[in-house]
Image: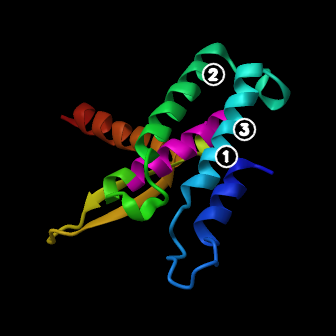
Amino acid sequence: MKIRACLLALLLVAPVASASVDRGVLQFEAIRTQQAQIRTGVESRSGRFKELPANTRSELLAKQAQLLSLMEGKQSTDELNETQKTEVFNTLEWIEAAVNNADDERMVCERRAILGSTRKERVCKTAGQLRVEREAARERMDSRDMQR
């Protein structure tokens, strides 16, 4: 099963053992188990991980360590602030993209201020969408500079 499918299942179908559990809450035990399985595969360079480049492998292991450190002593995303929740999501998406060699499909989220408000909203786009938007903005800037 792809990691993305697991993440979506965790996000959308949180454990139903307790009726008071928020459906958008990630349970960290499942993530820890999943990351341990990935680490084992990466370190043994077996299966789908055998073709993973050395630099991606080391970056993946570093991101896992950072993720596990952020989750240490916590049971779910309920115990994190919004910035930490976004960091957990982005790190999991990066790992998923690296494992599946699908960087352009990786979701990247950020918290952006809402114009005219002190509130922030979470905006998520794929890495490919962000790249296209950056390139288009760069081209617009370059064309304006050439018109002057």
- The magenta-colored residue range is 85-103
The x, y position of residue 22, in whole percent, is 50, 76
Label 2 secondary element: helix
Q: Earlier in the sequence, mark 3 or mark 2?
A: 3
Relative to 123, say whether 73 is above or below. above
Give the distance between the C-alpha atoms of the residues marked 1 and 3, in whole angstroms: 6 Å
Label 3 secondary element: helix
Q: Few, some or many C-alpha atoms within 10 Å of disc 2 (few <14, some 14-19, many ≥20)?
A: many
Q: Few, some or many C-alpha atoms within 10 Å of disc 1 (few <14, some 14-19, many ≥20)?
A: few
Q: Earlier in the sequence, mark 2 or mark 1?
A: 1
Residue drawn at point x = 57 percent, y = 19 percent:
58
The x, y position of residue 111, in whole percent, is 32, 57
Label 1 secondary element: helix
Q: As rendered, which of 116 and 46 lies closer to the eye?
A: 46
Q: Amino acid at mark 1?
A: Thr
Residue drawn at point x = 33 percent, y = 59 percent:
82
Please state which of the two labelled residues, at mark 3 or mark 2, is closer to the viewer.
3
Q: Amino acid at mark 3?
A: Gln
Determine which residue is flagged by label 3.
Answer: 37
Q: Can residue 98 be found in the magenta stretch?
A: yes
- Give the color scheme: rainbow, by chain, secondary structure or one colour: rainbow
Contact check, label 1 and label 3, Cβ < 8 Å: yes
Answer yes or no: is residue 103 visible.
yes
Determine which residue is flagged by label 2.
Answer: 57
Q: Amino acid at mark 2?
A: Arg
Magenta stretch: helix, strand or loop mostly: helix
Determine which residue is flagged by label 1.
Answer: 33
Q: Can residue 115 be found in the magenta stretch?
A: no
Residue drawn at point x = 50 percent, y = 83 percent:
20
Q: As rendered, which of 94 and 62 lies closer to the eye?
A: 62
